[in-house]
Amino acid sequence: MKRIALLGATGSIGRQALEIIGAHPELELVAAASGSQPIDGVAPLTQVGGDLTDLLERARPDVVLNAVVGFAGLPATLWALERGIDLALANKESLVAAGELATSAWQRGGGRLLPVDSEHSAAYQCLESREPGTVHSLVLTASGGPFRGRSREELADVTPAEALAHPTWNMGPKITIDSATLANKGLELIEAHFLFGLEYERLEVVVHPTSTVHALVRFHDGAALAHLGYPDMRVPISFALTYPERTATPVPPLDLSVGLTLEFEAPDLETFPLLTLARQAGKQAGTYPCAFNAANEVAVAAFLEGRLPFLGIAETVEETLASVDGAPARELSELFEADAEARRLAERTAATA
Ligand code: MG
């Protein structure tokens, strides 16, 4: 039996995880948490909001599935990594914002960090048991979101409803907006850097509209390994929860008999500047990635509430990054300060946009 603690049980990942746990008697849900929705009876131990590490202390899980949205997922990520408890990580923001603190905790704890992000789960599988020196580069694919092919001018007046209509993946609102701006792929670049220890020069993003190839690893000998499948988050969730068993899911294997065309193109960095801003923030290191994430969370919330135009999301993040000092956080309290400062700056910028 594997004892699972599910954080973010009422979101898109959480609901799909409940389906997978329900289908596998060897997976025991010992605790579940949500941000605000009632979840009484979902698990023996439940919690709504508050400090989730209290719940984890009581639950003593073997695996923590962290599917909280945003920076709020950070304490649970650090709790699991520090203790060497397997972490199935759907909360990419915690690894982006606290990359250096999280990787140190991971090294001290010595547990597994299994990504529940489709691209990173795919990359993990392509990279598993390879010698790091054999890897040339990692390619993360992006669907391009609902606004692929549009110009900047055509994005000036888009509404939250238009931005929430994702062409291939069915996900929660925060990540769907991040997909429309390509901020999600920016967060994923930084996530990949910390997960796989690859320099940013070795991380590439390509647009691949059907989301069939989830990641591709190039090796120095000229070979490349790709991970293919239908875009369905139950696959990476199941991979992480049942690792290393790779148990069956309701998702059918890829059918090639109907014909399969794979198209790739370079991302439009001029129309979607958040990808470049994320790469720069990642390279600048320190608390720049934390500030990128904080400003993006603030700007996305403002856009969803109708307080900020779509193009204002990138402008808010760019101005915030230009205003912070980005100094490394030596401890968690300094990271919280950097996050709070970036949020203050971003709120001010968004209010005047
Ligand atoms: Mg992803």
Image: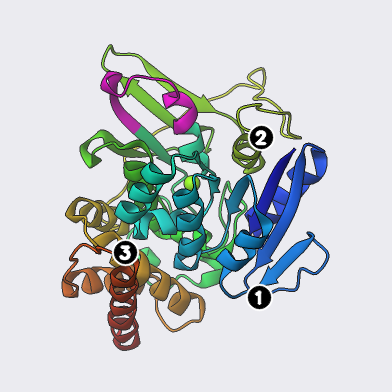
On residue 290, the disc is 3
On residue 138, the disc is none
Depicted 101 relative to depicted 41: above or below: above
Residue 9 spot, x, y in % from top left: 68, 60
Specify whether residue 131 is painted magenta: yes
Relative side of 332 to 213, left or right: left
Element class at badge 3: helix
Residue 94 spot, x, y in % from top left: 43, 58
Residues at discs 2 and 1 in contact (Cβ within 8 Å): no
Local packing at callout 1 (Cα closer than 10 Å; few below 14, some 14-19, many 20+) is few
Between 153 and 106, the one nearer to me in the picture: 106
Residue under the point 24% across and 73% down? 320
Residue under the point 48% across and 82% down? 306
Q: Quadrant of the N terminus?
A: top right
Q: Residues under labels 2 and 1: Cα distance? A: 28 Å
Residue that badge 1 annotates: 36
Specify whether residue 140 is painted magenta: no
Element class at badge 2: helix
Relative side of 326 to 35, left or right: left
Label 2 within 8 A of ligand 1 by Cβ: no
Local packing at callout 3 (Cα closer than 10 Å; few below 14, some 14-19, many 20+) is many
Q: In the rendered structure, which amino acid carries the disc numbered 1?
A: Ser
Residue that badge 2 annotates: 242
Residue 55 spot, x, y in % from top left: 64, 65
- Among the two numbered marks 1 and 3 on one chain, the one whose residue lies closer to the N terminus: 1
Depicted 334 relative to depicted 105: above or below: below
